[in-house]
Amino acid sequence: MNKPIVNPGQWDAYIGLGGNLQDPVAQLRLARAKINALEHVRERGFSPFYRSAPFGPPGQPDYVNAVAHVRTSLSALQLLYALQQIENSQGRERHQRWGARTLDLDILLFGAESINLPELKIPHPEMTRRAFVLYPLADIAAPDLTIPGVGALSDCLAACPPQGIWKLPE
């Protein structure tokens, strides 16, 4: 997608939240509040928290993950930049791919758009192989949600068993 920065209308977007440093549950709660405080962004749903084994370099603490469903009039790039500011405000450092972090915010889906820009790929390229994304997404998405260029969320769930993730008590 090579569309202008400003999109007319409203978009439904799904945002993956994750972290494994400095009290991850508190980090995700704070990030949720900051996302909800963004202008032109309104929460429509929020999944339970899930704990998952680390994905990436060994020796990391477990992650806590969730998914937010928002409605926004921001463009995908505007939303990305706002989410990056939230990550930075919560001490996100980018030293190692898939390394430990205070907070990771990823736009998973943005309407029915397929976006392929150097700084942003939607649908998120790894989401269909990650139970810690798919199961929280399924908790809040419509049962017939389709992932652009991939297919039904239900088919993705069937191909990605929930091994290595645990729903945290509320």
Image (tube, rainbow, N blue to C red):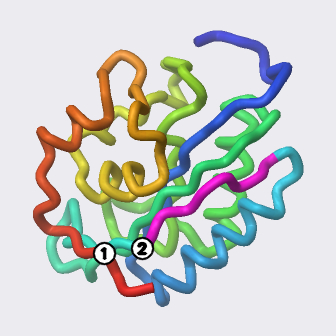
Does 46 appear in magenta?
yes
Q: Amino acid at mark 1?
A: Lys
In the figure, 92 relative to 119: above or below? below
Please state which of residues 78 and 89 is positioned toward the viewer in this rendering.
Answer: 78
Q: Which label sits on residue 167?
A: 1
Question: What secondary structure characterizes most of the magenta part?
Answer: strand
Residue 77 rendering spot, x and y as whole percentages: 69, 32
Q: Quadrant of the C terminus?
A: bottom left
Whichever of callouts 1 and 2 sits on the residue coming sooner in the sequence is 2
Magenta region, residue range: 41-48
- Identify the mark at residue 128; answer none if there is no mark: none
- Estimate the x, y position of residue 119 in percent, counting from the top left: 55, 32
Distance of mark 1 from mark 2, alpha carbons? 6 Å
**Residue occupying image coordinates x 37% and y 50%:** 138
Residue 75 in the image, given as x and y percentages of width and height: 74, 29
Furthest residue in direction top, as rendered: 2
Q: Is residue 58 above or below residue 128?
A: below
Q: Residues within 10 Å of mark 1 (few under 14, many from 20)?
A: some
Element carrying mark 2: loop
Residue 107 left/right relative to 167: right
Quarter containing the N terminus = top right
Q: What residue does disc 2 label? A: 49
What residue is shown at x 46% (from left), y 81% (from top)?
Answer: 24
Locate residue 69 relative to residue 122 in the image: left or right. Answer: right
- Residue type, mark 2 in image: Phe
Q: Is residue 157 left or right of residue 13?
A: left
Identity of the residue drawn at 60% across and 74% down: 91
Mark 1 in CB contact with mark 2 (< 8 angstroms): yes
Task: Tell me which corner region of the image, top left, top right, bottom left or bottom right, holds residue 88.
Answer: bottom right
Q: Where is residue 107 drawn, in percent x and y?
A: 54, 42
Is 5 part of what is drawn in magenta?
Answer: no
